[in-house]
Amino acid sequence: MMHLLMPFIAVLLGSVAALLLQQVSRQRVKLLLAFSGAFLLSAVALEFLPEIYETGKSQYAVYLVGGVFLQIILEFFSKGAEHGHLHVHKDVSSFPVALFISLCIHSFLEGMPLEHAHSMTYGVAVHKIPIAFIFTGFLIANKASKAKILILLGIFAIMTPLGTAIAQSIEITEDAMTPIKALVAGIVLHVSTTLILESSDGHQFNLAKLVVMLAGAGLAFLV
């Protein structure tokens, strides 16, 4: 049940924080994104990669690399919203539908293999908090109505649990799930490494970011 609830609750937490705080320094958001990126990277290395390669079937590498390129395609439409790149539009009527759909596809796919993936479930949940925060702030800045904000956030919040629930309901075998895990691993590897690389301004050393990244990476191995 936790693998269904945690990503949903994480979106709620991020959204409520955006509504209550209104303004949070960009630096603090970057720190949270860096933490989540390091956590995700360790989680996928801890859980998905060993499971993928213990099969001894090298063709799963195709799915992993495919996941990386699939995420690149999704980011063409989402404009990098998965790692905190959202820009305010002057008119709410110009709300980018393709961006939202890309975010939902990303969330749905990452939810499919989470049923027995404890570290990845935590990693996905941690990552959703800053993304929900940024997305909610984006909607508020675009002067979206409360009803529209609630509907969009509700859809976004259920996408990852929906992916998990559908994967459970159709009882996907382990052999069939492995390619899905490889695809999601590629998606997560791209997002997590991008978060880590983009966390440094001008590639300068930043002790705070290094500390939160080490904390995120270490925590993934503990949970």
Image (cartoon, grey):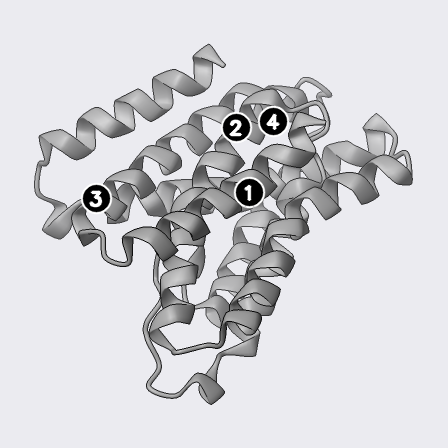
Q: Position of residue 160 (x, y in %)?
A: 65, 46
Q: Nearer the viewer, mark 1 or mark 2?
A: 2
Write the residue at 71% across / 21% down: 56
The residue carrying mark 4 is 48
Please rate how many residues cluster around mark 3, counting C-alpha atoms within 10 Å: few if below 14, some from 14 to 19, many from 20.
few
The residue carrying mark 2 is 122
Considering only order in the chain, which callout, 2 or 3, is on the residue closer to the N terminus? 3
Q: Nearer the viewer, mark 3 or mark 1?
A: 3
Q: Nearer the viewer, mark 4 or mark 2?
A: 2
Q: Amino acid at mark 4?
A: Phe
Q: Nearer the viewer, mark 4 or mark 3?
A: 3
* Dot label at residue 28: 3
Q: Position of residue 154 (x, y in %)?
A: 62, 57
Label 4 – label 2 distance at C-alpha: 14 Å
- Secondary structure category for the residue under label 4: helix
Label 1 – label 2 distance at C-alpha: 18 Å
**Viewer-closest of 51 and 141:** 141
